[in-house]
Amino acid sequence: MDWVEMILKKSCEKTLTKSEVLHSLFHMIEVNENTLNQIQTDTRDFGPELEELKQTEIRDLEFHLKYYRSLVNYINLIPENKVIRNQS
């Protein structure tokens, strides 16, 4: 069963910590907010077809922002002692 322990150890070594996950989510929020801001402040007129595409992109970005923020809230509610820790 040594191979099982070795695989488990390798798996644990690859597991992200709570702070790493949160950092990644905050980065995704920032990227999506910046992209959303760029799209919303672009005043060029591309015609009705591209305006519809622009509105779809805005809705998608808003959805992703809500999703990432809800993940941040959920992860923040998890007590540190419930997070799997690397047992080196």
Image: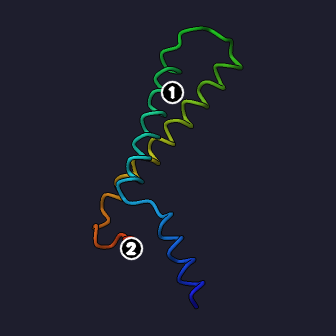
Q: Residue at horizontal 68%, vertical 12%?
A: 47
Q: Are discs 1 and 2 less than 8 Å apart at CB? A: no
The outermost residue toward the bottom is 1
Residue 21 location, quadrant: bottom left
Residue 57 versus residue 85 in the image, above or below: above
Residue 46 versus residue 81 in the image, above or below: above
Task: State the residue in front, 42 or 88.
Answer: 88
Q: Pick whichever of labels 1 and 2 is earlier in the sequence.
A: 1
Q: Residue at horizontal 40%, vertical 51%?
A: 70
Residue 25 in the image, given as x and y percentages of width and height:
43, 46
Q: Helix, strand, or loop for circle 1? A: helix
- Residue linked to disc 2: 88
Residue 18 in the image, given as x and y percentages of width and height:
37, 59
The amino acid pointed to by label 2 is Ser
Task: State the residue in front, 1 or 27.
Answer: 1
The amino acid pointed to by label 1 is Thr
Residue 68 versus residue 36 in the image, above or below: below
Q: Residue at horizontal 68%, vertical 16%?
A: 48
56 on left or right of 28: right
1 on left or right of 22: right
- Residue linked to disc 1: 35
Residue 22 in the image, given as x and y percentages of width and height:
38, 51
Q: Helix, strand, or loop for circle 2? A: loop
